Image (spheres, helix red, strand yellow):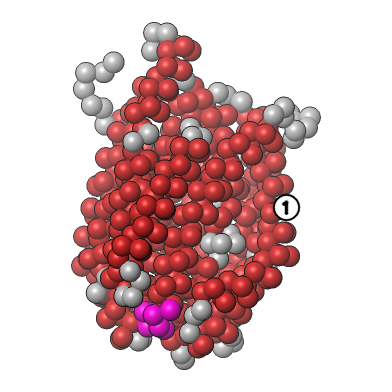
Amino acid sequence: MRSHISLEPVGRLWHLAWPLIIANIATPLLGLADAAIAGHLEQAYYLAAVTVGAEFLVIFFGTFSFLRMGTTGLVAQAVGSDDQAYSFRIVANAVLLALGIGSLLLIAGAQAIDPLLHFAKPTVAITDPLQEYLVIRLWGAPANLTLITLTGWFIGQGLTRVALYLSIGINILNIVCNYLLAIELQLNSYGIALGTVISEYAGAVIAGCVLWKKFALSGVVINSIQASGLWLQLVKINTPLMLRTILLHSVFVTLSVFAARLGVQEAAAIGLILVLLATAAYALDGFAYAAEIEAGQALGERHFIRFTESLWAGAILSVVSTTIIVLVANLFHSQLFQTLTDFQDVVTRANALMTWFTWILLALCWSYWLDGVFIGITKTVDMCLAMCVATALGWYGGLWLMGTNSLNQLMAAFLIFSVIRTITLAARLPAVVFEIKRLSIQTHPKS
């Protein structure tokens, strides 16, 4: 064992992470751009429809984010064990799964919109544009899920710059389409939804072409995409991830629902805070994704030292980055909100929530990093159980304790959820470290 701390693992993780940080930031920047476009339309309810609608869509799309996470972990382990043929089988089967789920969402999702809005009970002004936005966005389901699956393969392979170029290109196209349709053609929130769907299909086609080129250049011969036990493994890994994702997104959806019940201004303010939190989270997820690569490939190699070094590197980079984000956000949040919307009442309410934003992000940054570690080694059951505890005790228990009659009460409950989410996941880390060490010793007795 080394007797000193080396900066090499930090540099290695940073090399993997920085393209993903930029790529991840591009996604919430799209949310910021959509909010800015909607915020400059004629009525505030367009802004509320776009921001609240984006949160509602986690029911339809976000539930299946396991397609990326499960793909990344399995592919990273295949790369670590030097089995590229298996990594191609994984992505082929995952894409088939994504297309199937996406098609079902396209068919069945429209039927769920009315019950969802009946449950949410938004104000009358928000209801029609919100329903219109959701109906159009559902047409992008097959492309959306295929794209996140292919992105998972690129990340698992360590091809983080490919993920960066794809993300930037797709999001630039999205912003241009949304501006032209919503502002120039005056289609309002309908135009924003349509522009997003167009960019999703374009992105899926581009990503598929890149994957095909990588496959052609690799020289790997695959007689069949089927592999013994692969579908069982995909189900075993992805089912807990799906349950975990449903629980997580139920928190964000109910937060948006309770904010919408308070009124248009409150819903729009929460929407701006969630966009800002998503921007910070996506940036920090760059380190989480890098942790997925390092942890998964280290497990594939049975390399304990690489695994432990990646843990320390990920923790250091996550904490430093969070501190910087918090400082910048608190210095410039008012200017940012004023850029996003012309409605001063919304800006005032959002500014008042920034203290909550700070504490929530400081609590969540550790869970983002730990998520990456657990995804890389495909410990999805542990992730699901931790989220069950955090959601039940932290979020719904917090709502029962704090109440739902003001934005401050909602933020307080969300902070409780964030703290418990981090603590429950961290409690499982020592056992995971011991298991990786045992596997490494069995494979490399002198390591």
In the orientation shown, which residue stands out farthest toward the front? Answer: 400
Q: Residue at x 50, y 38 (%)?
A: 380
> How many other residues sit within 10 Å of disc 1, few (<14), some (14-19) or many (≥20)?
some
Please tell me which residue lies in front, 374 or 198. Answer: 374
Q: Nearer the viewer, residue 165 or 431?
A: 431
The x and y percentages for residue 423 are 31, 43
Q: Answer above or below: position of 128 versus 306.
A: below
Residue extending farthest bottom: 42
Q: Which residues are magenta?
A: 261-266
Residue drawn at the location 36% of the way across and 48% of the way down? 421
- In the rendered image, residue 123, in percent from the top left (x then y), is placed at 48, 84
Which residue in the structure is indicated by mark 1? 100
Image x and y of residue 236, in percent: 61, 36
> Which residue is nearer to you in this view: 84 or 447?
447
Q: Residue at (59%, 78%) from the top-left corner?
A: 131
Instruction: Note whether 141 is above or below 36 in the view shown.
Output: above
Q: Is residue 172 visible?
A: no
Up-down relation of residue 348 to residue 398 (above or below): below
Residue positioned most to the right: 223
Which residue is farthest top? Answer: 446
- Image side of residue 220 versus residue 176, left or right: right
Residue 102 screen position, x and y as percent: 68, 57
